[in-house]
Image (cartoon, rainbow, N blue to C red):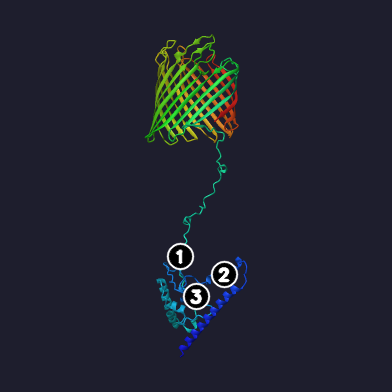
Amino acid sequence: MSGVRPAANRVLLHALFLAAGTAASIGAAWAQETSPLRGAVTEDNINNELLGRQQLAQRPSPLDPQPAEAGIPTPRYQPVSPGAVPDEQQRQPARAQRSLFREENPDDTFDEDATQEQARPPTTARQRAEAARQRAAPARNVAATAEEPAEARQPTERAEPVDETPTGTVRTGRIDDDLDLRVDPRAERAAAIETLAQQADDDPYAPLGLRLGSFIVTPTVESGITWTSNANYEPQPQSAVLSETTLRLNAVSDWSSNLATFNAFGTFRKSISGAELDEKPAGIDGTLQLDLGNEYQALATLGYVIAPESASSPVTIEGTAERPIRQTLAGSLGVEKDIGKFRFGLTGAAERDWYGDAQLSTGEVLSQQDRNSTLGTLALRGGYEISPAATPFVEAQVGRRIYEQRIDDAGYERSGNLLGLRAGVEIDLGEKLSGEVSAGWIEETFDDPRLAPISAPSVSAEFAWSPLRGTTVGLIAETTVEGATTPGESGSVLYAGRLNLERQMRSNLTGNLAFGLGYRDYTGIDGDDVIFSAETGLTYWFNRYAGLTGRLRHEQQTSSLPDRDYQVNSVFVGLRMQR
């Protein structure tokens, strides 16, 4: 009877609940029909109505199983991926909150929800493993409690394990998340081109030049007025004011290994007032240096000059209205070979001289064809490098001079052979000092036995020295055998040298100082000439392309022969332009 009474009580309690629910439903429907219209419903009222009663998180999920009274039971959702829906133990509190009137009693066998949850086995391997750990936990706790002393036993709350396995779609990061987009700490912000710090120009007034193919070409124009005390370099001076313009062109190759240079000039000099003078000297020369490989080098030169004959020429023609024109064409080709520290070189050279007709003051023309000649030489040099800065050498030279007119107007055969021997040293100290100096002996014999051989010591030097920054010192010295047309005279030997000093006093102010000295020794007669020249000049640059220039020059010749002395002073002021 005791078992039947509780069952009867439960049936009665269920019946009371059913009646109360039916009465509440009928009352709500009647209230809606009898109450007047409430008017427009605002959004705030709807939110308060929906959110005020229950929290969204506490509302039943449509995935939860429905009670049997609701109709046909819906199959429980089983996800493909484990953990897609919360575990049963996690959903238990939500299910308990749905009951408003009953108390939860897990021991009540008539509780349908409890019966279903207890009867439903775990559906996944992970859930089954978790249930096994929970069943084993009480046994382990009892064993551990039995071993611990009584005072150490304290009730502890069992920590539920947290499953961190993803239960849904994992958000994929951006593609550039895998890239290291951090800025290099050494990287600096690039400034604008016009704000970049530019290096100071060592020579801000030097010409820039023009690029023509693989050459850098530098043109220069100098034009101004010249006053001279002796326009024709005569013993009786006559002053004049001249208009003088000079064009210069310099070209240097921009090659990686070989080198080529090219120079040209042309001067137009004409009288404005005073003595009559009209001269147009011009010249051109070039060099080519080739590296042939296997320690072979080749050097070729070629030059041409056309100008009035120098006033200091050993040949004097009396009664001329102006100095005759002289043309010179010279060229050379040499090959050098290095064998260890030994240096060997073979050079062939040729020089051709033409002399124009002399215009006499009487109006007649005097031919100078008997002075035209060609000189060919062959030089063999051998040296030994005792250090990178010094290479001593010896050189032997042989040659022949051939006159265009075999027998001159006086009946002499002036063609002859040339023989020379000299020794010297090559100096190479880089940009500081470079060049060579030598001394020896030279001799020229003639085909006509009536002419005495020309035999004399010879000197030669060519140096470029830079003792200070912005200062250049140049030295050139040479020995030349000169012919003659006077009957019975063989010729002369000329020793000439020039020392030039150029100094950049300021970036836009350049000064130069030059000295020239020459000595001529005549063969067959007792006579000599001493030639001296000095020059100083300044150039002030307004900018890189134009500047003001001026020169002061003095020349004189003193001779033991009559009517050969002269003295000339000249001043030039003009404008120099370059590119």
Which numbered disc covers residue 168?
Answer: 1
User: Alpha-carbon neighbours of circle 3 within 10 Å: few (<14), some, or many (≥20)?
Assistant: some
Q: Amino acid at mark 3?
A: Arg
Residue 194 x, y percent position in the rendering: 57, 42
Q: Is residue 346 left or right of residue 30?
A: left
**Which of these two is toward me, 7 or 565?**
7
Choose the circle earlier in sequence order: 3 or 1.
Answer: 3
Q: Nearer the viewer, mark 3 or mark 2?
A: 2
Q: Nearer the viewer, residue 292 or 92?
A: 92
Cα separation between marks 3 and 1: 23 Å
- Residue 484 visible here: yes
In the figure, residue 78 lies in which quadrant?
A: bottom left
Please say if the residues under marks 2 and 1 sit with CB atoms less than 8 Å apart. no
Provide residue 13's location: percent of width, then percent of height: 51, 83
- Mark positioned earlier in the residue sequence (3 or 2): 2
Q: Position of residue 119 (x, y in %)?
A: 42, 78
Instruction: Please provide percent x and percent y for residue 281.
Output: 52, 20
63 and 331: which is toward the camera:
63
Q: Is residue 83 left or right of residue 222?
A: left
> What kind of element bears circle 3?
helix
